[in-house]
Amino acid sequence: STRRTHPSSLASSRPSSGGDTSSSSTGSASPVPNNYDNLEGGSYPVETNHLLVAAPYGSYGYPGMPPAYHQGPASLANASPSHEPYGQSGYQPYSQPFPSMSQLSTALGGLSGVPELEVEALRPVNLLQEKNLLPPRALEAPEPNLSPELRKVNCSPQSFRCTLTSIPQTQALLNKARLPLGLLLHPFRDLQQLPVITSNTIVRCRSCRTYINPFVTFLDQRRWKCNLCYRVNDVPDEFMYNPVTRSYGEPHKRPEVQNATVEFIASSDYMLRPPQPAAYLFVLDVSHNAVEAGYLKYFSELLIDNLDKLPGDTRTRVGFLTFDNTIHFYNLQEGLSQPQMLVVSDIDDIFIPSHDSLMVNLKESRELVKDLLTSLPGMFSHSKETHSALGPALQAAFKLMSPTGGRVTVFQTQLPTLGAGSLQSREDPNQRSSTKGVQHLGPATDFYKKLALDCSGQQIGVDLFLLSSQYSDLASLSCISKYSAGSVFYYPSFHHTHNPAQLEKFQRDVERYLTRKIGFEAVMRIRCTKGLSIHTFHGNFFVRSTDLLSLANVNPDSAFAVQMSIEDSLADSSLACFQAALLYTSSKGKRRIRVHTLCLPVVSQLSDVYAGADVQAITCLLADMAIDRSLTSSLSDARDALTNAAVYLLSAYKSNVSNLQQSGLVLPASMRLFPVYILALLKQKALRTGTSTRLDERVFAMCEFKTQPLQQLMRMVHPDLYRLDDMSDQGALLLNHTLVPQPHLLHLSAERVRRDGAFLMDCGNVFYLWIGKSCSDVFIRDVLGCSSYASIPENMRHIPELETVLSERVRAFLDWLQDKRSFCSSVHVLKDEASAKAPFFQRLVEDRSEAASSYPDFLEHLQQQICRKE
Amino acid sequence: MFFTIKRYTGPDQAPFQPARWQYHGTTRVPHSGRRDRKGTLYRKMENGGGSVHSITCGLLCTDFPLGVLSQIITLSDLECDYINARACCSKLNKWVIPEMVGQCLSTMLMLVSMHWFTFFLNLPVAAWNIYRYVKVPLGNMGVFDPTEIHNRGQLKSHMKEAMIKLGYHLLCFFIYLYSMILALIND
């Protein structure tokens, strides 16, 4: 239809929706006057008296130059005489970082001769014969097949990862490969170093609004070609100056063009309202059930301890709200001698009793806040009220936070039973281990979804901590966080004394939660090269328009994924680029834009597509797709789809690429772990059948799949297993004067686990250290500090700091693993005893479990399926 | 060819249903003209029995194409980023029930007046409208859900559906118009 042609032509004149600038409704259809020109870097008034726009270059003509520029650095020397007007420093070193497309493709062509990596990735692996599929070290993201310069500046795979590091040219080729195309993003993760750019003009493409990035092409010194839409743009004057080297005329050396991940301090053009103060509202369940669980005391202690570490500045505001069958507000206005509790019992028509004293400045009312937190656990200790009016409490929170937006943290311990949003128990405990299908994975009401969208519109993010021992319908409750870009935490069977493991996890999570970075009023836009389009989004956010994600809050622990399709052939270009731009208000009240750009080669051969396949990213994306499928269709459909993904890949590879007429299951080396991962996925709580799984735990596992970053998710699905007792310094890394031993990865099968060893399983947020019955006493004594196997205590939760070589090695290795993640993982020491070893052996996914097949059986099943298809 | 031809001979056919039964199948005037809803209704109005029906139906069949057209415009607004998903979906959801009721009503009228061809033409669309309304999952905010519309190509399939409906309603509109003119001429 004709209307479809509008976006590109109108985008430049409608910056409010074309850019990441809009943080509320972009509903207006009237074109906004084109007052963003200065920002976009185009239509600069030509200052005739400007030094640089001297006569011969007035028209940006570069009379004798263009060929030289297209030839690249080699021929620059010939052209140097014409650089004279720029002076010595200006033009001479102008070697284009990434010259024109044609040149790139020749560079690539040269590269793709027979690069070793690619050959290794394509080595056919017969799964039935090769038993050791795991690499010795944890699997890394594959390197895209790019020229070394491009590879050097490309975005870190931890922030931005594509399932196929070689993008197929056409949708037909993609279909033939039988692999999903998608991106996995972790845009707000904690970074060690990040170039922050303060500049009046943020240079962006005039038509598609892409931020300038290392992969654009400088046609000449005053013009650059967008790598996403191929429009030629002007380089603004300010951009000619390089603040790092303090030299003029080197636009290609600016930090924006040297780094694939940059952060801009945005000007007021990127704001719809002045940056709001950081606002935190805590909504606490104080019903009888909550008092029984006893979380309040621990929460209060943690919050008091971390009050100073809450991200924010002098304007930070906090508020508290508690609820059982009524809603209690707390007046914390500065000057009061003690906190004042206001009770609203009309939960059908909730109102805010006082408007300015409920959300208070943390700095001014600090003592009152402390008073309240100290007295809170005692205040309700005799509560007999069993009902929970969560819905009205959330409505109250929404009303309270609407003016500023911010973060609402909800602690809930049971099924909401009163007022709007009350729910009924839907779980049938007898169906927990049914193999037929699982009901009630979706929400029971749209109340929470609607409220979440209202919250999202007012820039309120809602995070949910569910601590319950009974069914609480997380499927419905989680909607409040899912669509307001919040996070969900779930502690099944939480009890402060009976379940110390959950309590410990709760404390660790809350501490990280309170102190982690936060961005408010955020939007993220994902742009990709013309021809590619996004068709499905995974994660916690609200998709406001085709490529704009509205994130009321953004936190460093949540990740997103998108699925893409190839609408038009990419044959014209040799590179495909993706850019994710996250615009947010920092807790210090600064508007910032974090931009990640990823560049990948485009290929036309199926074998190249397989060579660049990223098996971990593919697994994660398939997991997301399976979750969607189980919600829209059924769990068994989702499971079938996963198995089929492996079957289709195996048969596609057999019929298209491998010319060996060998029988058996053959996959390229890059994808050799795919069946293991699929089997591991099928055994996860979210997708398993036949094993007793509580509905809430299943739903929570599904939420985790959608929001956890790739590394974390992969460790959950397929933990890393190492043997610790025979570690040597061979191949160890030397980091900061400590030797970090590098034990080999082991397959997750009981046959690799020996009685006489000690094995470490890294499951992401927890390390299990399993000690075999006949493990050497030296290891037990030197590492655990116990005299013998029998004297290892039941609930050992740490590795003592002993001055022995073994202990130092183990700790160095654990610290090294820990260093690579943002949160603190706990260590559980497990003995080889029936009750204790269960969590360890459950995760050995290659073994047969009560309801699921072992890896060899699974391969056999795949082979049968393939035969049936042929 | 299209319909069984029915003729109402005069205003004295007071008992509506029996008279129609009587005439149905007995008085066949080959090629004397086709009548459809409009024509029938026109006569019924004379009978004084179905004036309300006729107005509803007349409105309906002109309103459908316009309604679907506005649906297409709203959807493409969303596609082009002129409107956000929430606003778009609440706009579209408002029309789901009226459309369904209208479609069912007109189908019922066809059935009552025994215009079998148009009845069977309307039936699948009415059935589809009911089906998609009933099939909305509990937690969704209606047939068009703002949180889902950008996923799994839903926007495209909604667009496709609206396009097909537009074609269908336009076709119907012209069939009705044609039949009405024929009916008028025959009178």
Image (spheres, coloured by chain):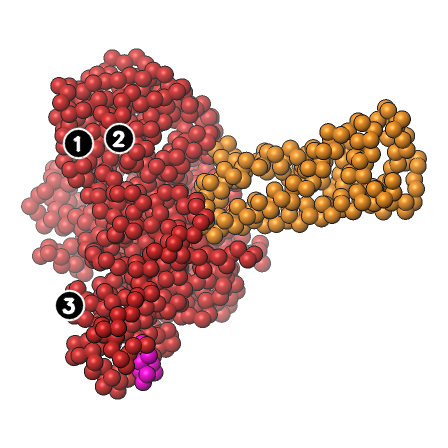
Chain colours: A red, B orange
- Badge 3: chain ID: A
The residue tagged 1 is A362
| x, y percent for residue A230 | 40, 67
Front residue of this view, candidates B144 and A517:
B144
| x, y percent for residue B48 | 80, 27
Q: Amino acid at mark 1?
A: Leu
In terms of secondary structure, what is the magenta stretch mainly?
loop
The Cα atoms of the two marked residues, 1 and 2, are separated by 11 Å
The disc, 1 or 2, on the residue closer to the chain's N-terminal end is 2
Is A354 placed above or below B90 here?
above
Q: Is residue A567 left or right of residue A185?
A: right
| Image marks 1 and 3: residues in contact by CB distance under 8 Å | no
| x, y percent for residue A792 | 17, 35
Front residue of this view, candidates B148 and A862:
B148
Please identify the quarter of the rendering in which residue B110 is found.
Answer: top right
Residue A91 visible in the displayed image: yes
Q: Quadrant of the N terminus of chain A?
A: bottom right
Is A287 placed above or below A265 here?
above
Q: Is residue A210 left or right of residue A807?
A: right
The Cα atoms of the two marked residues, 1 and 3, are separated by 42 Å
Badge 1 and badge 2 both on one subunit: yes
Residue A281 - label: 2
The residue tagged 3 is A245
Q: Residue at x 72, y 45 (%)?
A: B172
